[in-house]
Amino acid sequence: MNVNVYITNHRNKTVALPVSPSEIKVNFENDESTSKVIGLGEINRLGDKKLKSIKISSFLPLDSSKVSYTTVRKKHKWKKASSYITFLKNIQASKKPCRLVITGFKFSMKATINFTYGMSNGVNNEYTYELDFTEYRKIKAERIGKKHGKKNNKIAKHGQRRSKPQHKISRGSKVLVNGMAYLTKNATHGVMIRKRECNITLVSSKAKHPYYVVTTGGVAMGWVSKGAFI
């Protein structure tokens, strides 16, 4: 069974690449980072997942009707390589995502594309190409100041800044830590930190130790509770 690649543009026009790629690999990654904690050494901080990506390399016959090695049915196949090139260039120029479906691989993804093509090895009866697909995630933006259908008409006067509420501890706050710091936000064993000036970089409000702190010099201390601040 051949693995075929179908691409649908934002106008719901679908076409299949005429020749199956010899290799397809999907890249799944998390946004991980490492840092050093006093008394523990280097730790790996797990992050959220990154956008999936996939690269496809193959070739387009100048005239698919004159070769026997195409792998898709006529209904989804165009004769001329120029038709595929125009279709793919138009998707990229539209600044809109497309839909990538790979049969036999059970893979479907909404994505943006980058398209590169040309000729190689002195062969003039086909184009070689590369397609780079990057996952597209749609986000919803909410208008600030609008809540429960009511408009917030309060506008700060020109030249004035809103003052921060006093004693409010949040991400970005500078604090003096004198207490236990933990490797994870719900850990039971930690290390003692003595009067270190730190910045709060992460907040997990429902955790046992909700504040992740880093010294002003950039050294990660770990997770602490509010009682560790003086």
Image (tube, helix red, strand yellow):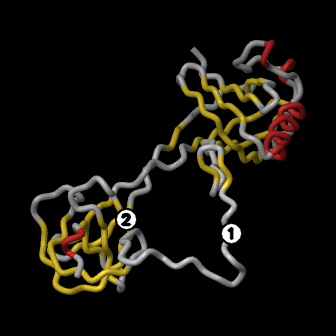
Q: Nearer the viewer, residue 210 or 187?
A: 210
Q: Nearer the viewer, residue 173 or 21?
A: 173
**Alpha carbons under labels 1 and 2: distance apart:** 30 Å
x, y percent for residue 164: 48, 76
Tell me, yes or no, whether the two marked residues, 1 and 2, touch with CB atoms within 8 Å.
no
x, y percent for residue 174: 37, 81
* Mark 1 Cα shell of 10 Å, populated few (<14), some (14-19), many (≥20): few
Q: Quadrant of the C terminus?
A: bottom left
* Res 117 seen here: no
**Element at badge 1?**
loop
**Element at badge 2?**
strand
Q: Quadrant of the N terminus?
A: top right
Kind of residue sitting beneath label 1: Ile
State whether residue 67 is above or below residue 43.
above
Q: At 41% across and 69% down in the image, what residue appears?
A: 171
Which mark sits nearer the N-terminus, 1 or 2? 1
Q: Label 1, on which residue?
A: 155
Q: At 39% across and 55% down in the image, what residue appears?
A: 47
Q: At 24% across and 85% down in the image, what residue appears?
A: 196
Mark 1 vs mark 2, foreground winner is 1
Kind of residue sitting beneath label 2: Leu
Q: Label 2, on which residue?
A: 202
